[in-house]
Structure formats: structure tokens, C-alpha cells
Image (tube, rainbow, N blue to C red):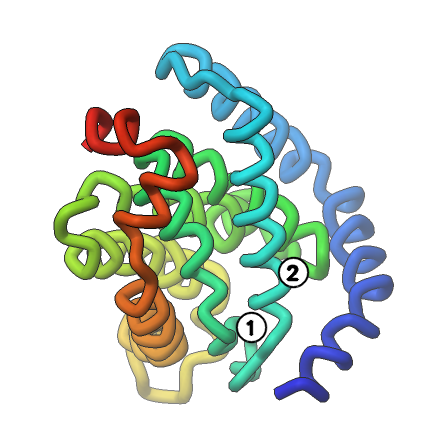
Amino acid sequence: MFSNFLEKISEIPAGISEAIAGLIASPVSIALLVLLILAGILFARFSKITFTPKVMTHVGVAVTMAIVLDMFVLFKMPQGGSVTLASMAPLFFIAFIYGPNIGVLAGLIFGVLNLLLGGFVMHPIQVLMDYPIPFMLLGIAGYFPKHMNVGMLIAALLRLTSHVISGYVFFGQYAPEGMNPMVYSIIYNGSFLAVDLIIAMVVMNLLPINKLGSRIIGRELYLKYW
């Protein structure tokens, strides 16, 4: 696993170059990403989210941890996607601590960075549905602070839906002969996401979320929020 991490680190420069080259070759993808980021900023403003230095620091730490854990690859799929060392856990954590709105924004930041660190660009819609959107959907878990496992399962299913649609539309040609592309996409994406989710859920259930939440944002605010 550690050797995979070092390999992933060594691949970052080439991955960034390939991702940037792919985006440059697809100006529409850049435009859609910019529009999505602007929409995220407007969403934050109308949601009345207060970005204090403390909040921004915690979001930054969560996103950074998610990126690092994403580099610890336990199993890699041939056409993209992998089982990681609980890379979804930090995004779930920030969503449960600060709520779904900030959770969605943290997912947006992670998704864009994940793309820039070596994403595959085939089509503008594919870019959105494989990178920012699925990770933004993980923030939905924050709507279920008292039922974490339910929230994580629903959020992961939403992420899976985004990947499945992208796989069906843009990668259907990789389906084995005679297999329905939609079935193939569900099996392909579901196989690694299910394991990734189980690992993240184990980690989240081992963490004292309530105690950490009280310490991170203050007991009174945490209890008032939830």
C-alpha cells in the first residue's frame, strides 16, 4: 500500500500535465467548471454560510486529508476508479460537523483538485459527472447527523449514480460483448465504491463524532445546530 502511495506521488506531475492538457483541449469543460465554481460561491452566499478562518482551515484540512488518503490505493480498476484508504471519510466528517452545505462545498473543492491531479477528460459532461458532482453529493450525508450510516449510504448511492450515468454514456464501449452498458457501469462502479464506502463507514463509526464536533465548533453551537 505504501509503495502505491509513493507511486501515486511520483505520478502527480505527469497527471497534472495530462489533466491540464485535456482541459485546454476542451474549453467547454473549463467553462462548465468555472460556472460550477461560481454557482458554488453563490450557493454559499445565499445559504448564509460564514467562512470564518476556523471554518476555512477545517475545510482545507479535510480536503487535504481526503486527497492524501486517496493516494493510498488498495485496489485500482482498469478504466479508472479505485479502492482507497477511507478517502471519503474526511468529506463525510466535515459534512457531519458543519452540515450539508459546507459538506457540498468541500466536495466541490476536492472534486476539482482530484481532476487537476490527474483526471481523465473525455467530454465536458463526463468531467462534471466523474469529478466535482459525485463528491459534492457526498455532502448530502450531512442531512443525517443522527443517522450517520444512513446518510453515508444515501450520499454514496448518489455518488454512484453520477458515476454510473457517466460510465454508461461515455464509457459504454468498454462493456464486454453482449453485456448491457448500463449493467456493466453499475457493476464496474459499484464494485469499488461499495468497498470504499465500507472502509469509510468503519472509520467514521470508530470516531467519536459528537465529542469531536463539540470541540471543533463549540459544544453550544454544535448542539444548537443539530
Q: Position of residue 28 (x, y in %)?
A: 65, 35
Identify the residue at image location x=52%, y=85%. Answer: 75
Which residue shows up at 30% across the image and 53% down it?
209
In the picture, the quarter occupied by the C terminus is: top left
Mark 2, other Cα within 10 Å: few <14 / some 14–19 / many ≥20: some
Mark before the other along the chain sequence, 2 or 1: 1
- Where residue 58 sits: x, y (%)? 53, 39
Which quarter of the figure has residue 224? Answer: top left
- The residue that mark 2 highlights is 120
Instruction: Report whether 179 appears left or right of 84.
Output: left
Q: Are marks 2 and 1 in contact (CB under 8 Å)?
A: yes
Which labelled disc corresponds to residue 220?
Answer: none
Q: Residue at x 26, y 27 (%)?
A: 220
- Pointer 1 local density, CA inside 10 Å: few below 14, some 14–19, many at least 20: few
Query: Residue 58: in sight, yes or no?
Result: yes
Q: CA distance from mark 2 to mark 1?
A: 9 Å
Amino acid type, label 1: Gly
Residue 179, by quadrant, is bottom left
> Which of the image's four quarters has the N terminus?
bottom right
| Amino acid beneath label 2 | Phe
Looking at the picture, does residue 103 appear above or below residue 78? above
Q: Nearer the viewer, residue 51 or 46?
A: 51
Which image quadrant for residue 206? Answer: bottom left
Q: Position of residue 123 (x, y in %)?
A: 59, 50
The answer to whether residue 22 is above or below residue 3 is above
Element marked by disc 1: loop
170 vs 153, nearest the viewer: 153
- Of 17 and 69, the residue lying toward us: 69
> At x 49% / y 64%, what residue is drawn?
87
- Which of the labelled discs sits on residue 80, or is there none? 1
Q: Secondary structure at mark 2?
A: loop
Note whether 142 is above or below 68 in the view shown.
above
